[in-house]
Structures are given as structure tokens and as C-alpha cells.
Image (spheres, helix red, strand yellow):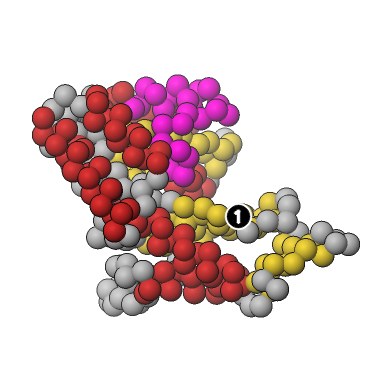
Amino acid sequence: MDTEITTKTKLRRINTRRVAAAVKKLFIEANTILGADVVSALRKGLKREESPVGRQVLEKILENAGIAGREAMPICQDTGLAVLFVEMGQDVRIAGGNLREAIEEGVRKAYQDGYLRKSVCDPLTRANTKDNTPAIIHMDVVPGNQLKITAMPKGGGSENMSAAKMLTPSAGVEGIKKFILEIVEKAGANPCPPIIVGVGIGGSLEQACILAKKALLRPVGKKNKKDKRLAGMEGELLKKINATGIGPAGLGGRVTALAVHAEMLPCHIASLPVAVNIQCHVARHKETTL
């Protein structure tokens, strides 16, 4: 059996074949079907946009997403680096092989069978790995007997515009906001706006970067409910980013960003890590629970 629950221990056994199949499906769907939250945010942006050129860009983006969904074609030619967030219940047992290898196999099959562009290469020789592996896998062990997998194809154009910085504690909230705005303004048209801005504050350097990327998984425009300070910062930053005039595709207008999402963790008393992960308008992610 692919899945079996042992009644005495409530241990759930999940076969690697099922994991690989789920990962394959997630990446194909993520690359061809734009989430309803993103489509809704784009439509709201179209209503707000006053620039004729900006409106035209948003209309084409929505038209493109519609065609991709109907024809099962990639929304963008850059089908992304395969990033996954995996939450593994402590009462799950993986049967039939290695979990990481199963995830990699799912990515491999998705990019081969789904005719998705393979964009992974050796950093120095630039030789393509030819199957879009290895994937970037962030693994967390959580209570329960389920396995949650979130697939996030991340395009190179927006990732290139992302950044992290170790601020001094004296920089405070204003220093955090200043850094975020500087990164967005410097990015300009490069990350294919309208963008979604993921912000990670605190933790360590690498934790801030992961937080910023995780923030992008939140439904577009949904405020941080855990921290009113962050919710207020998100709203303030969104207004300031849209006041830059960068606009859709960088051609001018009011809708430079669809949302700002911020997450935070406690940090060392001597540090103030901040990371900004920019997502293009093709905000792709799909999840499933086994």
C-alpha cells in the first residue's frame, strides 16, 4: 500500500512513489495555473491603475495567465528553480526509499514530462544539469502524521533582485523600511512588476532569507495577523512602493507591487538581519498534504 496507518502507534507510512507523483503534479500545476489570489490581486490592480500603458500591461498579464491555464502551458518561459517547503509530521514514516530522492525524482519528472524549461546549472562552468535538479528543499519536522509539501518555482529575474543585510540594532524600524524601499527602487523593472515583496526580519542571516521567501507563500494581500506592527509596516511599505511610479513592467503607473508580506523572528541582541525576497507577477506556488 502507498499509505498505511498503524492503529497501535498511529504511525502513518507514506510511500516514496506517492511523494514523487505529488511533487511532479505540484510543479506542473504551479507553472501552468496562476493562483486565484494572484489573479484577483491583478484584477484589483487593473481597477486602480490610471496609466493607459500600465493598464494595457496588466490586461496582457491576465490574458496570458488565462491562456496558460486553458492550454496547460507555462505562464512564463522561466519555469523556475525548484524550491520546496516540506513539513513532515513526526509520526510519519517514509517507506520505499529516501524522501529527498523521491522529491528530486518528482522535480525531474515534472520538468521532463511537463516540457518545462530546465534552468539549473553549475555556478562556475554554467553547464546545465539537464533536469532542473538539485531542488532547494526546506524541511521542518512538525507534530502529526501528515506530510505537507509546498512547491514554489522561483524565477531568476526576481530572485536576482532580492537581497539581505545585517543592519545594526540602532537602525531600528526606520532602517528596516529604508532598506526595503532601496532594494525595490533599485530593482526597478528587472523583476517584472507588479511584484510581491517578501520580507524576513530577525533570526540569523539565513533564517531571515528563508522567512522572506516563506512570506511569499501567504495569499496575496493577506496581512500578517500574528503581529499588528508588521501588518502596519506592510501597508505603509505598499503605499510607498506604489508611489515610486515604477508601475507595471516598469513602464510607469501606480501598481508597482500587489502586496508586501513580512515575517519576523527574535534575533541576537547585537544584530538586526533583514532580507527582501522579490516575486514577479507570476507568483507560483501549489501545496498538497499526504
Using the rendered view, name the quadrant where residue 172 is placed: top left
- Look at the image and give the residue range highlighted in magenta: 216-238
Q: Position of residue 156 (x, y in %)?
A: 29, 57
* Residue at point 51%, 53% (across, down): 287
Q: Which residue is mark 1?
A: 289
* Residue at point 47%, 29% (across, down): 223
Residues 125 and 134: in front is 134
Q: Position of residue 251 (x, y in %)?
A: 12, 37
* Residue at point 41%, 58% (across, down): 29
Residue 74 appearing in the image: no
Figure check: 188 above or below 108 = above
Name the residue type under label 1.
Thr
Residues 289 and 70: in front is 70
Q: Position of residue 125 (x, y in %)?
A: 28, 76
Q: Residues within 10 Å of mark 1 (few under 14, many from 20)?
A: few
Using the rendered view, name the quadrant where residue 42 is placed: top left
Find out whether residue 219 is within the magenta segment. Answer: yes
Find out whether residue 235 is within the magenta segment. Answer: yes
Residues 47 and 224: in front is 47
Using the rendered view, name the quadrant where residue 255 is placed: top left
Give the structural element (helix, strand or loop) at label 1: strand
| Residue 101 falls left or right of residue 243 | right
Q: Position of residue 246 (x, y in %)?
A: 18, 33
Figure check: 120 above or below 247 = below
Figure check: 243 above or below 267 = above
